[in-house]
Image (cartoon, rainbow, N blue to C red):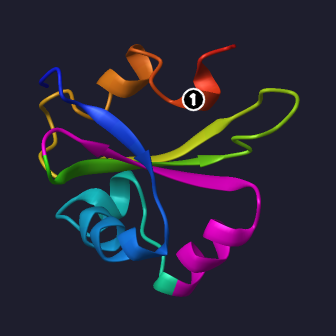
Amino acid sequence: MSATFHLVRGGADDLPFIMATERLDGYDRLVGRWEEQRHRDALVDGSHAYFLGYDGPKPIGFAMLRFWNAAERTTLVRRVAVVNPGQGSGTTPARRRRFPCLRGD
């Protein structure tokens, strides 16, 4: 992962990438799959947040967090999926505490 890695808050325009990524071979058992409407509902329910990881101009994966804004700081990492699994791009953001809700500040 390069020094240009960054996370961006996801939105409805990112659903094609999110849904294509979670539908990669093997992810049905590993991370699950939602239909578009369920993702759309999660985007506006006030409890979920999506973050896309970029390493350059294209997204390389996403994370879905639940209770990301809970006062009790009980955030659940509900889903992490990357385009090229096995290269560390799914674990590095959490290890580096790059998710805003995991910083503890």
Q: Which residue is tagged 1?
A: 100
- How many marks can you see? 1
Q: Decide which of 105, 64 is in the foreground and name it.
A: 105
| Residue 11 position (above or below residue 55) | below
The residue stretch that appears in magenta: 37-56
Disc 1 residue type (three-letter): Pro
Quadrant location of the N terminus? top left
Q: Does the magenta stretch include residue 45?
A: yes
Q: In this view, does 72 lie above or below 59?
A: above
For the residue pair 105 and 19, the one nearer the viewer reads as: 105
Residue 65 placement, left or right of 104: left
Residue located at (31% from left, 77% from top) = 16
Q: Is residue 102 magenta?
A: no
What x and y, as percent, mark residue 82? 24, 48
Residue 81 in view (yes/no): yes
Q: Provide residue 46's location: percent of width, then percent of height.
A: 77, 60
Instruction: Please give the name of the residue rendered at 26% of the width and 63% of the height, measured from the top-left corner.
Output: 21
> Residue 35: where, in percent of width, then height?
47, 82
Quarter of the figure that contains the C terminus: top right
- Left or right: where 102 falls relative to 93: right
Using a 10 Å C-alpha cutoff, classify the residue at mark 1 as few (fewer than 14 neighbours), some (14 to 19) or many (20 or more).
some
Residue at the limit of the structure toward the bottom, as seen here: 37
Instruction: Please state if 68 lies on the left or on the right of 58 as rendered.
Output: right
Q: What element carries label 1?
A: helix
> In the image shown, does 80 or 15 lie closer to the viewer?
15
Visible residue check, residue 82: no
Residue at image coords 47%, 18%: 97
Residue 95, x across and y down, in percent:
40, 15
